[in-house]
Image (cartoon, rainbow, N blue to C red):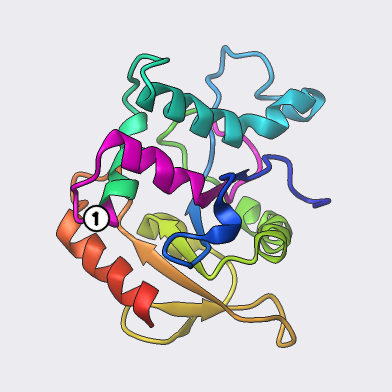
Amino acid sequence: MDNVFFTPYIGPNYPQGYKGKKILALGESHYINDDDEGRDHFRDYPQLRHFTSDIVQRYLNYLSSRMNYRGWMGTYTKFARAFYNGNLSFAGIADFWSHTAFYNYIQEPMANTRQTPSKKLFTECEAAFWEVVRDCRPDLIIVWGYRLWERLPFPKTPLTDSLFQISATADDQPTRILPITHPSAPSFSYQTTYDLLSAALTE
């Protein structure tokens, strides 16, 4: 994947899928604080290529009591539990993530969580996104948040009121894509998200 810097996390059981469906969760961006070495010259640090997988692994370490809880980890918990309308044990969450992939669309680190990537950066990162889609071949992409959804620069063809279809070119196999409220948002609802996910997985 020539255009990808932050390579996706791919669970060891991803080829089996979740209930037979390969799911790619799509976040917006990573962030590295201004005083952290590497943000301005991140491409000079090849170990950062695994930043996405390292973040998910840190979360999994927390689930297995090998790391203390951090506030950002709740996002990954809520996303997994949304598939079960909020009711899923830590063991079940770990199993879910072993069957799932995760990728952040923006391929440059932001300075903080509230920084919105530029429109130019969204456009520049499109080629990397399609490389990941072609490599992972997901049955369903789930977009974390409507801010990200609205800034994705490619066309989305509606299949239902909430489910869409995308493809890089007319010759590519179409991929289904579903935007949801970001799991970290105060307005995130298990019931609403569960209903959307259930409908998308049965279409």
Q: Does any portion of residue 132 appear in the rendered image?
A: yes
Residue ID at (37%, 55%): 145
What is the total number of numbered labels drawn onto the structure image? 1
Element on which disc 1 rests: loop
Query: Which image quarter: residue 199?
Result: bottom left
Does residue 121 belong to the magenta stretch? no
Does residue 87 belong to the magenta stretch? yes
Query: Which image quarter: residue 124?
Result: bottom right
Residue 6 point in image, percent of width and height: 67, 40
Q: In the image shown, does 202 or 154 lie closer to the viewer?
A: 202
Looking at the figure, which quarter contains the C terminus?
bottom left
Residue 19 is left or right of residue 194, and the answer is right
Residue 121 point in image, percent of width and height: 64, 51
Query: Which image quarter: residue 122?
Result: bottom right
Residue 17 point in image, percent of width and height: 51, 60
Residue 43 point in image, percent of width and height: 78, 30
- The stretch in magenta equals 82-110
Residue ID at (32%, 67%): 197
Residue bearing the label numbered 1: 84
In the rendered image, the vertical position of residue 9 relative to residue 123, given as above or below: above
